Image (cartoon, rainbow, N blue to C red):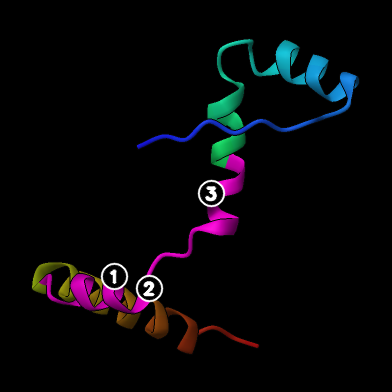
Amino acid sequence: MQKKLTITVDEEVYAGLHKVVGPRKISKFVEELVRPHVIRPNLESAYAQMSKDKKREKEASEWAEATFKDIAHEKR
């Protein structure tokens, strides 16, 4: 569900948004900028869900091991 929000911005800011983003795209632009700062995902449950994907976990483990082996043999 969407909610309507009225905000006040400087005239120049509004003109810039209108010119750069587009007249019918400002709301989406602002939402995409703000969302990561106000909605925090539950990372613990997301990681737990990802760990249940055995194929993905196997590929990630193989990649990590291969990367570690590459670094172990480099000269310092």
Query: Considering only vertical position in the picture, is 46 above or below 34?
Result: below
Label number found at residue 43: 2
Q: Neighbour class for label 2 at 10 Å: few (<14), some, many (≥20)?
A: few
Comparing labels 3 and 1, the label whose residue is closer to the camera: 3
Q: Which label's residue is closer to the chain start, 3 or 2?
A: 3
40 within the magenta span = yes
Residue at 19% across / 77% down in the picture?
51
Q: How far apart, in angstroms, are the residues tagged by discs 3 and 2? A: 16 Å
Name the side, left or right, on which 6 lies relative to 53: right
Residue at 19% across / 72% down in the picture?
49
Regarding mark 3 in the picture, which secondary structure is present there? Answer: helix
Q: Residue type at mark 1?
A: Ala
Which image quarter is the N terminus in?
top left
Residue at 41% across / 84% down in the picture?
68
Label number found at residue 35: 3
Q: Residue type at mark 2?
A: Leu
Name the side, left or right, on which 19 lies relative to 74: right
Looking at the image, do the residues carrying marks 1 and 2 touch, with CB atoms under 8 Å apart? yes
Q: Residue type at mark 3?
A: Arg
* Residue 63 sits in quarter: bottom left
52 within the magenta span = yes
What is the span of residues highlighted in magenta in the rendered image?
A: 33-53
Label number found at residue 46: 1
Looking at the image, do the residues carrying marks 3 and 2 touch, with CB atoms under 8 Å apart? no
Regarding mark 2 in the picture, which secondary structure is present there? Answer: helix
Q: How far apart, in angstroms, are the residues tagged by discs 1 and 2? A: 5 Å
* Residue 76 sits in quarter: bottom right
